[in-house]
Image: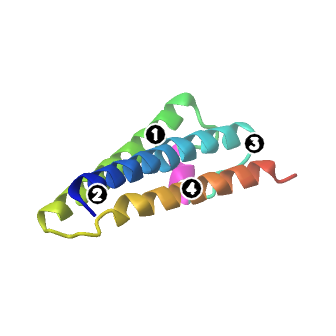
Amino acid sequence: MSVSAATSTAAGLWLLAIVLYGVGDLVTTAVGLRAGLKEGQPFVRRLLGESPTAWRVALFGLYKAVLLGGFYLAYVALEGLGIRFRFAIPAGIAAIGGYAVATNVRTMLTPR
């Protein structure tokens, strides 16, 4: 794979990671909470509180942005080490985000 193709692939994977993990999970979580569902992850449930406000959802978004930034720093650090398969970082984040979005949507669509 050429350098430009690898860069293009990595950029696409990062975009997918941001869309699915950063935005998709945040939006589907907020919609689910407004629909009366409860957050399943203990840390996020604590972060959002019993009755999530817009500020708490924004704090959740900031938490996700910090995580994505940390993962990106790890990705950049691996470049300096010459590791060729570092694209697994954004691919893994995108996969986790896709799973979270699918789980959130499935939960919202399940009759209660």
How many marks can you see?
4
Between tags 4 and 3, which lies in front?
4
Q: Residue at x 51, y 41 (%)?
A: 23
What's the residue type where badge 3 is placed? Gly
Q: Which residue is mark 4?
A: 98
What's the residue type where badge 1 is placed? Gly
Q: Residue at x 48, y 42 (%)?
A: 60
Q: Which residue is mark 2?
A: 6
Q: Which residue is mark 3?
A: 36
Distance of label 4 from label 2 (alpha carbons): 22 Å
What SS does tag 4 mark? helix
Q: Residue at x 75, y 42 (%)?
A: 36
Q: Position of residue 109 (x, y in %)?
A: 80, 49
Residue 46: say if magenta: yes
The magenta stretch is: 42-47
Between tags 4 and 1, which lies in front?
4
Q: Position of residue 34 (x, y in %)?
A: 70, 36
Q: Which residue is mark 1?
A: 61
Q: Quadrant of the N terminus?
A: bottom left
What's the residue type where badge 4 is placed? Gly
Locate residue 42: give its quadrant: bottom right
Mark 2 surroundings: few (<14), some (14-19) or many (≥20) residues within 10 A = few
